[in-house]
Image (cartoon, grey):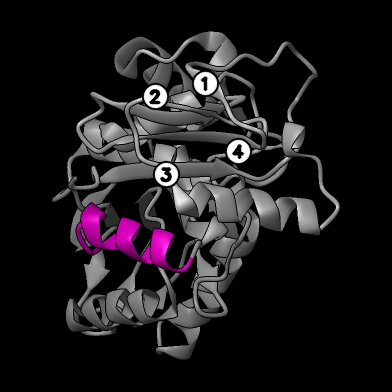
Amino acid sequence: MKRPTVLLVLILFLPIQVQERHSVANLSASGFATSRSAEPLQALAEYVEIIKSRGQNTDDQGVLIESLDGRELLAEHNANVTFNPASVMKLATSLVALAKLGPDYRYRTNVFAGGPIDPATRTLDGDLILEGSADPMFSLYDSQEVALQISRLGISHVTGALRIAGQFYYFANGYHSNLSPETSATKLRAAFNHAGIRIDGDVVFGPQSGTLLLSHYSDPLASILLFQNAHSSNAVAEVVGVSVGGPQGIQDYLVRTVGLNESDIFVGRASGLDFNRITPRATIKVLER
């Protein structure tokens, strides 16, 4: 008989609370429930033996195995118990971002002149304003590209401040960390200065105003999420989360649109850092979307 294609989710963390465990169909000697109609799942049996050999309790594990079309439940154990998903939470963040923004969405960073430009002296008499939109991967390379465009527009000296409007984050160390708004602005100013854009004033935060000079676009969201999930980048996931309403925005979408029960999901961080919880059954629903 042809084996069914299966989707396997194993959550290997302690549950948030002890609650009644229940299963379906026949309960095997290992404590895991399996479907009467399914052939024995060797992978599950091997997994159980590995857990036991490590001296761990299978009651602290969550398993749900079903066919890819979702029509056949092959095995489950603690499928409705909440566990710490760690970086699996990034998949939920990705789902919400794709649904709200679309795979072709590009984050836009605008630069404005807050005063007149003297082409003879290449001087902007006023603030240089950068308006961010929570670009998750704005880096040194991007700042250098923006500085080059500013220079080509005839500006190498700014008499005012570098004013940051909107949500701007700067990434360093190969995108492994995202910086605070204050540090991000300081890094941006240093990059501009290194590229030959001298700014007399301080870094300040305020509203967007002035004349639009240029717009810088990120890679498509689909590419950003591919990087995020392939590298399990907490930094990228955190800022993607900001762009879709933060942890509460992610949780609200999963409950109201995906149809998860409020008791099945808690999003504390978009990246999966710190305290987050989800059941194996809810995880399957996210993957099915």
| Residues tagged 1 and 4 counted as in contact (Cβ below 8 A) | no
Q: Is residue 271 visible?
A: yes
- Name the residue at 48% across, 89% down: 194
Marks 1/4: CA–CA distance? 37 Å
Q: Which residue is identified by label 1?
A: 26
Kind of residue at badge 4: Arg
What residue does disc 3 label? 8
**Mark toward the start of the polypeptide (2 vs 1):** 1
| Spatial separation of the CA atoms under disc 2 and disc 1 | 7 Å
Residue drawn 48% across and 22% down?
251
**Residue name at image x 21 percent, y 51 percent:** 211
Is 46 in front, or is 157? Answer: 46
Please say if the residues under marks 2 and 1 sit with CB atoms less than 8 Å apart.
yes
Q: Is 118 situated above or below 16?
A: below
The stretch of residues the image draws in magenta is 219-231
Q: Main secondary structure of the magenta part?
A: helix
Q: Earlier along the polypeptide chain: callout 1 or callout 4?
A: 1
Residue drawn 46% across the image and 31% down it: 75
| Residue 36 - label | 2
Disc 1 crowd rating (10 Å Cα; few below 14, some 14-19, many 20+) is: few
> From the viewer's perspective, is the residue at label 4 or at label 3 nearer?
3
Residue under label 4 = 269
Residue type, mark 3 in image = Leu
Q: Quadrant of the C terminus?
A: top left
Looking at the rendered image, the disc whose residue lies closer to the viewer, 1 or 4, is: 1
